[in-house]
Amino acid sequence: MKSIFFKMSFLLLLLSGCSKNSDSSTDPVPLDDDLAGPISRPSSGYGADGTYKVAEISFPNTEYPGTQVTIFYPEGTAVARPTIFYSHPYGGEDKEYNRGLFEFIAKKGYVVVFVPYPTTDISIDHRYLTLWTGFTKAAADYPNIIDTKKVGFMGHSFGGGASIGLSYKAFTEKGWGQDGRFLFTMAPWYSYQITPAQLGSFPANTRMITQVYDEDVYNDHRLAIDIFKNINISDSEKDYYYLKPSTVAGYKYSTEHNLPNSRSAYDAYDYYGVYRLLDALIDYSFNGSPAGKNVALGNGSTEQVSMPGYNGQSMAPLEVTDNPSPKYDPGKYLFPCNSPDNPRISNCN
């Protein structure tokens, strides 16, 4: 486990100064400013900002003293709302790192729970416990805000890998998601606390989006592919996304490991490559919307893969498949699939 610890510390140092473009600032981007780059937010449909004002509630994070669990929710809500439980990447324990995503969810009328865990906590099991304790305490203490009958688990990097085992536990032990459930993983890391039998027995109403990013040099795409191919979700209810960089009007829309976030460049890839698809997946998973399915899980539909443009220049379309294969050798990545630290190393071939 020492090798994981040192690699994680190295990754934290790299990401702390990482930017999606030439601006190396790590200050949070003011969300009332225009997006970076020439392409604006969607003005309507999936991915457009909702009309709710955003409220926050925080409470002490018992497994990580000195930090707070935060619930983002639509202000003035009179009933419990469908909820997304978000697991952050290494180094992303400040909620400002992904405030854009959290506020987008709340503006649309849903709830998101954010639980920080320490990157330098040497126990992977304790990170999982920290996330689990925060999620379950939020649900238990705020039943007037959180509706556990409709839930999603969303995570990036370490949090993407963790979302698999945590969601299975919530679905099977807690019964969460009986009226709708989904997974949305981004550039996922190794997945612990999930057996092959459990992975093969996810509840039938689970939907899933998995994303990987072309310029990611940290997490081997084989990690995402392994889970995607072996999880008990039919091809019609899951899609694997491959996001490629684009240059529009001289601005590079990057697809590095830290997509999405609002700490560095906050741009059209956040809105069109992540928020729009999440919005549609929520609508399909919780409301049964055919339009939502066509955008989120459209099996390569025009509405799903098309990306916006500016002055006749368009971003690269999204690649979507049910049968993904890796494009790069494992040696490209800091965390390759064939590492002995991967509990699912036998699935790397």
Image: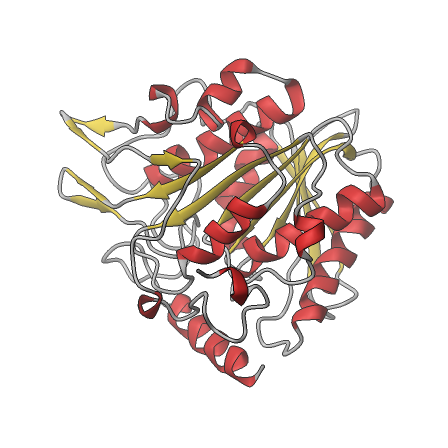
Image check: 106 left or right of 185? right
> Which residue appears at 78% of the width and 38% of the height?
176
Picture layout, residue 300 above or below residue 145: above
Q: Would you say residue 114 is visible in this rendering? A: no
The furthest residue to the top: 290
Query: On the image, which quarter does residue 312 sit in?
Result: top left
Residue 146 on image: x %, y %? 77, 36
Q: Would you say residue 314 is visible in this rendering? A: yes
> Which residue appears at 70% of the width and 58% of the height?
131
Residue 119 on image: x %, y %? 57, 71
Image check: 60 left or right of 162? right
Location of the C terminus by quadrant is bottom left
Picture layout, residue 69 above or below residue 15: above
Residue 289 on image: x %, y %? 58, 16
- Colour pattern: secondary structure
Picture layout, residue 6 above or below residue 175: below
Residue 120 on image: x %, y %? 59, 77
Picture layout, residue 279 above or below residue 35: above
Query: On the image, which quarter does residue 298 sit in?
Result: top left
Image check: 252 left or right of 223? left
Location of the N terminus by quadrant is bottom right
Image check: 329 left or right of 174? left
Tag count in the figure?
0
> Which residue appears at 66% of the width and 55% of the height?
196
> Which residue appears at 31% of the width and 51% of the height?
214
